Image (cartoon, rainbow, N blue to C red):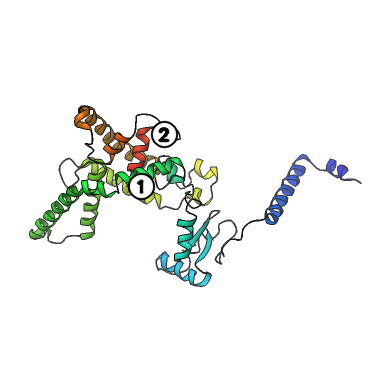
Amino acid sequence: MDFDHYLLLLSPIEAIAGLVTLAFLFYFVWAKRSSKPPLPPEIAGGWPVIGHLFYFDNDGDDRPLARKLSDLADKYGPIFTFRLGLPRVLVVSSYDAVKDCYSTNDAVFANRPACLYGEYLGYNNSMLFLANYGPYWRNMRKMVIQEVLSNSRLEKLKQIRLSKVQSSINQLYSRVQNGENSIVNLTDWLEELTFGLIMKMIAGKNYQSGGEGDEEVERFKEAFRNFLTLSMEFVLWDAFPIPLFKWVDFQGHVKSMKKTFKDIDSIFQKWLEEHIKQRETLTEANGAGNERDFMDVMLSKMSNEQFHQGLSRDTIIKATTSTF
């Protein structure tokens, strides 16, 4: 009896299942035989499919993750890998390895892995530290380095920083002098100081905790805390990039991300519209070189047209501003 006769004896479902099984077997055999460069060693303890998702949680060791990775580097060498679900994570812990990754082969390692919060919170991966390597990333990086981190820009904003620090120190002194508020949490004080400096340099906002008219900034601060919390949450889709985990939203993260993004974006949009109106009231002569903060700088450098990848000027400004 030939092979065709056997196929006639099978039901359509059995035949399809058999063909699918053969296709998977062929794929795995071909994948193993295909020439691939050797990968760094993978740590022991990985499970099929889920990898090492529970490796660092169930070991009974309360030390920081960096200490645990240091011990693994002593065992496996300065370069090793582990798997968080389907994605593979590369750990480098020596000067030569870091230099090889971020200097010699920096373009190869410049792309960022896809993540759910980048899509729903990061303006569809338009934020600088989420964007993939390419013309858009290079242009934004160049603008940030030249207009925010350059010596000339920092010198222009020197008085703003000094004024903010002096004001915060004076308020701290006043609180210490007051017997009822003599205990000061320096962690909270430094957080407020840093946040106030960022707000002033990026959006030109004067932030002072408990000050009059700071409800909007406080709301933004709370939304940004939620952003940081959600960006560090374990999301099923990041470990298993299957559309089902995005559509069904078992953990409720997509819903939370959409709400947090709406809060942040609405505030950014309001601040951006305020900057646009202020610039429109200035004459061309008086407005030249009168950039007070980063939003002003980006408005002066970009036209009200699509800049790259179909992104509007407002979206790029808000995405780049949220990076800070």
* Residue 251 vs residue 269, the one in the foreground: 269
Q: Is residue 162 left or right of residue 203?
A: left
Q: Which residue type does callout 2 highlight?
A: Leu
Residue type at mark 1: give it.
Answer: Phe
Name the residue: 24% across, 43% down.
217
Q: Residues within 10 Å of mark 1 (few under 14, many from 20)?
A: some
Tag 1 near tag 2, CB within 8 Å? no
The answer to whether residue 135 is left or right of residue 160 is right
Q: Is residue 82 above or below residue 17?
A: below
Q: Tell me the SS state at disc 1.
A: helix
Residue located farthest toward the right when viewing the structure as drawn: 1
Q: CA distance from mark 1 to mark 2?
A: 22 Å
Mark 2 lies on residue: 311
Residue 319 horizontal/vertical position (percent): 36, 40
> With 116 as the anchor, is 301 left or right in this view?
left
Q: Indicate which disc, 1 or 2, sits on the residue closer to the N terminus.
A: 1
Residue 255: tell me if it is visible: no
- The residue at 50%/55% (across/down) is 105
Q: Nearer the viewer, residue 177 or 36?
A: 36
Coordinates of residue 242 in the picture (x, y in percent): 55, 45
Q: How many marks?
A: 2
Q: Disc number at residue 90?
A: none
Secondary structure found at label 2 = loop
Callout in the foreground (1, 2): 2
Q: Is residue 230 visible?
A: yes
- Give the vertical position of 32 relative to 320 (above or below): below
Image x and y of residue 306, in percent: 40, 31
Displayed quadrant of residue 41: bottom right
Foreground residue among 52 and 286: 286
Residue 133 at x, y = what percent? Answer: 46, 46
Q: Dot 2 surroundings within 10 Å: few (below 14), some, or many (20 or more)?
A: few
Q: Which residue is mark 1?
A: 227
